[in-house]
Image: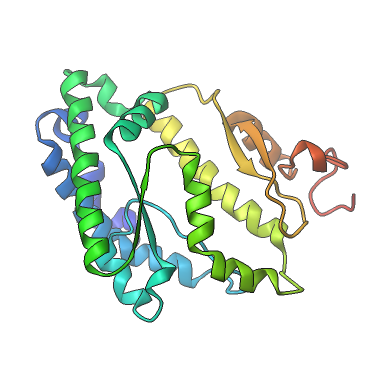
Amino acid sequence: MRPDEHPALHSFDTLSVEDLWVGTTGREIADRFEAASRERFAFVLDDLLALPRDAPILVEGPQLLPDLVAPLVTSHPCEALYLVADSELQRRLVEQRGGTSYARSSDPERAANNRMERDRVLSERVRKAAEQFGLGVEDVHDPAEAPTLIEAHFRHVLDEWDLQGDRGDVSQRRRDENSARLRQWRMYADESGQAPDVELPLACECRKPGCTLTIATTLKDAEAARARSLPLLASAHQVGLAQPEGTTE
């Protein structure tokens, strides 16, 4: 059964803005989020099992509840890490994102407060559960801290990967990663009703192993490049950018 065919998920996704954010409490919203996350988890696993296993895979998202993840990493609990943002950072991120559905509700202030309470409850639950199962937990006070914390925690996996000579088609993997972000970006833009004119960083889709460069692009420009089968390349790797992907530089 596909996610859109699941009756419980369909009911959750079709709640009105008023029911979702205003006529409820932050704790009730957290409960609904957890229930939907548990039902979607099987689909997440199906997607992961369908991926090639020729490279390490980093899976991220608030739906990865510790009690669901723990049985899958029983022999390697260090392969899971939970980054918990403090309340102030969470509020800043929500306000910066803007355009969310609760802003169009009859009581935006109550809806926003419910959203913040939901995040606080979920963070509290995630921390408690992760510690209970012996999984890694790190507090985050600034988004810039996240990459360093993630890299340090998974350094042993990265070191093993660095020792490999042939790392496969790294360009295609970066393209797949970016495509997933673009799909989420498009759905968010469509749901929020905001013109997607903000720039976000995406991974450089070059063929060089170990490249950490990014390209800042709008959703419109990224989708235009995809329509022309052009790779998204950082400025340092834009030789041959006008050529369709797959041609030599």
Residue 56 place in picture, x, y as percent: 57, 68
Query: Is 1 rendered above or below residue 18?
Result: below
Residue 203 place in picture, x, y as percent: 64, 46
Front in this rendered view, residue 249 or 7: 249
Residue 21 lies left or right of residue 176; in this view the side is: left
Residue 76 place in picture, x, y as percent: 41, 77
Identify which residue is drawn at 42% across, 35% down. 188
Q: Is residue 113 visible?
A: yes
Looking at the rendered structure, the number of numbered marks drawn on it comes to 0
Q: Identify the image quadrant of the N terminus.
A: bottom left
Q: Is residue 11 visible?
A: no
Residue 107, by quadrant, is: top left
Residue 232, by quadrant, is: top right
Identify which residue is drawn at 35% across, 24% down. 95
Identify which residue is drawn at 68% across, 68% down. 162
Residue 45 place in picture, x, y as percent: 39, 68
Front in this rendered view, residue 131 or 7: 131
Residue 107 lies left or right of residue 190; in this view the side is: left
Query: Is 132 rendered above or below residue 224?
Result: below
Residue 22 lies left or right of residue 216; in this view the side is: left
